[in-house]
Amino acid sequence: MIPWWRRLLRREQLRPNREWQELCERLPLLEGYSGQEMDRLHALTVEFLDSKDIQGAGGLELSGGMCRLIALQACVPVLNLGLAWYRGWVQVLVYPDEFLARDEYQDEAGVVHEGSYARIGESWAYGPVILSWRHSAQDAFGGEGGNVVIHEFAHKLDVLNGGPNGMPPLHRGMRPEAWTRDFEQAYDDFLHRCERGQSLPFDEYAAADPGEFFAVVSEAFFVQPSLVRAVYPQVYAHLAQFYRQEPHARAAARQNIPPAWD
Ligand SMILES: [Zn+2]
């Protein structure tokens, strides 16, 4: 439990002051945000820092600014959903760089292999989100077209209605059968592209399973929305409905290119 006076102090430090503005201006992820969206993002970030416990691991000492950068990115997917979508867990662990995680996988012959594998992020169904600080910061400032923080928090949304199957709880009026059909079609297309060695619209890791496809395409939806919309327009439309955001329209507004509905 965080004492009230510390929360107050943290809130004071987090007023949308010049430091906050300067940070936001440096993040490509936030280009095209309206003033209202920026205010909402700020309020959510404060709430996130109040309600989640972000801790350094593997010897990493976290500063307030580092926590803020992680919280801010985590709040992007729930900007129009609210923090209740991150319910049921509190901890975010941050390692300095890649970390080793125990895992097992089944090969094509059905043999199960167990070992330690290097990770840059991990999301436990009812437990913590684990992140590499180096990759979280790198992605925030432009990186290589992905965003590990959004990826791991997309998994948190996915598991709200069971396992990580690539379909989070949908809003009223959204049709699960349409979601499943369009995501399956896109996933199959992605697998074919991988098999044929064709160029891929986003990280090959999306081919791992439908849960990873949803997490990777969610990253791309926020980081490279025009690309997702061009390659998988139906998937883009479902994500826009689910996240209640239109990042392509934001990108269009700032680049003066035709909007999403043209
Ligand atoms: Zn993943």
Image (spheres, rainbow, N blue to C red):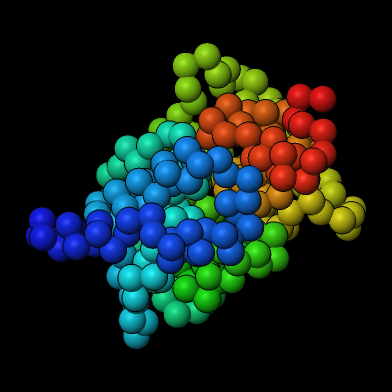
Residue 111 in view here:
no
Residue 198, given in percent of the width and then of the height, sits at 89, 54
Q: Is residue 231 above or below residue 60?
A: above
Q: Residue furthest top?
A: 173
In the image, 162: left or right of 113? Answer: left
Q: Is residue 53 above or below residue 46?
A: below
- Quadrant, the C terminus: top right
Q: Residue furthest bottom?
A: 59
Total count of labels? 0
Front residue of 140/196: it is 140
Q: Quadrant of residue 18?
A: bottom left
Q: Is residue 82 above or below residue 116?
A: above
Q: Residue furthest front?
A: 18
Residue shown at 10% from the left, 56% from the top: 4
Residue shown at 48% from the left, 72% from the top: 132
Front residue of 249/153: it is 249
Residue shown at 52% from the left, 76% from the top: 134
Q: Quadrant of residue 63?
A: bottom left
Residue 207, given in percent of the width and then of the height, sits at 69, 51
Front residue of 76/28: it is 28
Residue 50 in view here:
yes
Q: Quadrant of residue 72?
A: bottom left
- Quadrant, the N terminus: bottom left
Residue 186, given in percent of the width and then of the height, sits at 75, 37
Residue 239, given in percent of the width and then of the height, sits at 61, 34
Front residue of 102/186: it is 186
Residue shown at 34% from the left, 85% from the top: 59
In the image, 138: left or right of 236? Answer: left
